[in-house]
Every structure is written in structure tokens, then in C-alpha cells.
Image (tube, rainbow, N blue to C red):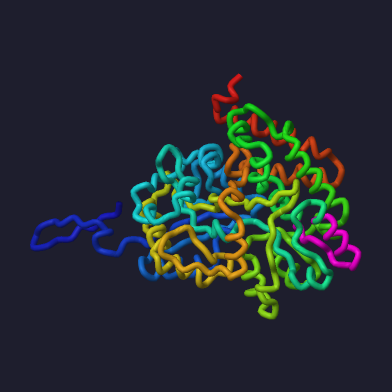
Amino acid sequence: MKKLIVIVLGMFVLLTVGSLQAQEPVTLTYMASQNWVTQAEMDLGARFEEETGIHIDYQIIPADQYFTVLQTRLNTGEATDIFGGQSGVTDLIINYHVEENAVDLSDQEWVGRMDPLVLAQATVNDKVYGLTLWNTLGTTWVVNYNKTIFEEQGLSVPTTYAEFRSICESLLNVGTTPIFEPIAAGWHHVLWFPELGPRYEEVAPGLAEMLNANETTFADNPTMLTVVEQLKDLYDMGCFGDNALADTYEYLPEALASGEYAMAVANLTNPQVVGDAFPDVSADTFGYFVMPLADNQNLNINPAGPTKFIYSGSEHIAEAQQYFDFLTRTENLQYLIDNDPNTPTLPFDGLTFNLLPGQQEFLDSFPPEKRGTVYQTAVDYVNPQWMDIGQDLTAMFIGDIEPSEVLVRIDERRAQQAQTAKDPDWSE
């Protein structure tokens, strides 16, 4: 440390430079996957800097590269002060090793205001490691459909796969692409499979527990095979259009707004995003139904989502906690809801949500017994291989592998991950 020697009345007085000038400003580095940090949050980051002098350096990584970059940085001890990750207990343990790599946040004030179901997915061994600022309710993945197109073609909401397939055929016959499916994104087309966890449980109660205990496999489940086969059927029919292998997720709002596509798997609150981007298209243009593969009529709920963690090796842990405190002030949470169409709800008490009446009616139409947890959260070692499943499904679409092989590969990766984690149920 640099020092100054000052002579005062013949006496030597030793002063550090830090005592004579202001402390160097702090910059918090924050790495996240694409679409995980909204402009509204960045606006709050600017306000945080005005209030505290602490700058937030947002480092946004493309989704198809993010987890590889994150794993590399965690493994080399070079993670950013704050890093984003998907919550879910298995992911916290296997992907991020949070007990080593993240700061215990259990004593933070905002923990007591967070939705317990969501909080549980950011908790390992009774310690909270993550802050989930995500529209976990509104981001329920459902089929958004254009009500005008359906009415013009005399179509109604399907309740079986056969009805869904018939709708697609009718739309193809009049030159409308039935479904926008951005396969090139690498992750979106995967949703059709694990999101149907409630249907798998309905057909085989306790299946998730059996999978977690290594008492059965994906490849042995006929309902899962049906789902994958029907997904391949939709692709082969041309339901995803001619450009599905090149389409990316960012085009989804425009695709629905254009009327070129009749449907897309999207968040429940996606119509607000469409209406915000295209003011001439009313959010009320769209209705909702659950993905009906394998005749599913259950609502898929995921209490997990993109979550913020403070790196245990950070030199600015206190400042990062200060940023979390700032973000979770009630007025700032409400700001996120009021200023971002992607965030009409947040998992905290004391907020006014921004759901459309039709969205609330849709949610209310599913009693508790017709709701369930998606399998990327309910079943261990599924979410960490999400992009791998995407590659397998793409290979299936183009005929490189059979639908059954998709399930076999999922089982193989689950076994590998379980053995790496020294899971006792997979011990040889």
C-alpha cells in the first residue's frame, strides 16, 4: 500500500493514501445467458449505481454457449462476482456446486418474502444460495394460438393429440404454417418433452420418484416414447414450416404477430410481449392450451427458473449482497413488473401482477389435481442435459436416429451424471 509521510510540528505522521482520497469505485461483474437480464433490470442497475457508486458490468453470453462458459469459469476459479444459472436442487448441486461456489444467502431479509416453492429450488441442505427474479408463474410454457385464425377456420381447442394433428392438417391445407418452432435455438423444441411431466405422472403415478431412485428408465416408459414419436410426426408433416431448422427464438413474437403462423409454444404471458413489440396486434388476439402430446390435459408448472448467485470467490461479496437487497425492494420488484412485458409476475409477496383476464381464467381452469411439476425440475439429471436433448431431437427430426434412441441417450447421460455426483442409487 502506498504511504505518505507528513511532517507536523517536527513529528512524523504516517498516512495511507486511502485515508486521503475516496475509495476506488467498485464494479460488480455479472454473467448471464441471453434473455436472462431485462432492460428493466439494467435500468435498475443504473439507479443502483447512482445510489451507491457501484457499477454493474453485465456480461451476456449466447444461450447455446452459456453453460459451457460458466462451467469453465467455475472450474478455473474465474467466475464473475454474480453468475446466473437455472435453479432446481439437482442443478445447484451438479452444475454449479453451490456449496463450494456460491454464497449462503439464508440470512438475507428478502428470503422471507419469496415464494416458498420457488425458494426451495434455490436451496441445498437448508441453505439458500440463489435469488430467483423470474416470472415463474407467467412463464408456464403453453401453446399460444391465434384465436382469429382458429375462428376463421372453424377450429377449436384440442384435447387430444388426434384433434391437435387434425388442426395442423387443416391449417396446412389453407396455406397457414401451424406451429412456429425455432429448432435452431437449440433449446426451445426440447420443451415439448420434459414439460409434460404431469402427464407422465398421471399415467404412471410415482414415476419421478422411481426415476430418481434409479428404479426405472426413460426408455422403458411408453408414454415418453409416444410423446417423442408424436413430436417427430409433427415435424414430418411440415407443421413447423420449411425453415424450422434455421428459425431462432427471437423471431417468435414477430412470427405470431404476422399471422403467418397459427401457434407457438410460448410463455403464458407471451401475448404481452407480442403486443408490446407490435402495438397493432392486441394481446387478446391469442388464447392458450396445454401441449396435447400423449393426450395431455394437465398444466405444467415449473417453480424453477434463471437465478442469480454470488460467487464465493468474489472480492465484492458485500456489494453483491447490497445489489440483491436493492433489487428485492418492493418498489423495485414492482418496477420490473410494470416496465417489462416479460415479467408480469415475480415470486414475492406484496406485488401487483399484470396478468390478462384470459390468462388468469386459463390458470383457474386447472384444479390442483390437474397441475404438476415439469420433469426438468422433478427428475434428477434432466435439466443439465437440456441442450444435449435438443441435439438428439434434431437428429431425430432429420432421420439420423430413431425416437427410441432419444430416450436411450437421455438415460445414458443421467447415469453418467449420477455417477459423477456419486449418487448412491447409481453405485455399482
Q: Where is residue 381 in the image (x, y as percent from the top left)?
A: 61, 37
For residue 24, which quarter of the picture? Answer: bottom left
Between 15 and 236, the residue placed more toward the observer is 236
Q: Is residue 334 above or below residue 373?
A: below
Residue 121 location (% of width, % of height): 50, 46
Q: Residue furthest bottom?
A: 280
Q: Residue at x 82, y 52 (%)?
A: 162
Residue 118 at x, y percent in the picture: 49, 51
Residue 39: x and y, percent?
Answer: 54, 68
Relative depth, front residue between 220 and 253: 220
Residue 174 counted in the magenta span = yes
Q: Can residue 305 be seen in this view?
A: yes
Q: Which quarter of the image is occupied by the C terminus?
A: top right
Q: Does the magenta stretch include residue 179?
A: yes
Viewed as shown, does residue 155 lie left or right of 423? right
Q: Reply above or below: 427 against 396.
A: above
Tell me the residue at 68%/40% (across/down).
203
Please name the residue shown 44% across and 57% down the image.
28
Residue range highlighted in magenta: 164-182
Decide which of 343, 94 is in the foreground and name it.
343
Q: Which residue corresponds to the image point at 81% horizontal and 55% vertical from the top-left?
A: 163
Q: Is residue 68 visible?
A: no
Q: Residue lying at the far top in this picture: please name it.
A: 428
Is residue 190 found left or right of 108 in the rendered image?
A: right
Residue situated in front as seen by the camera: 204 or 188: 204
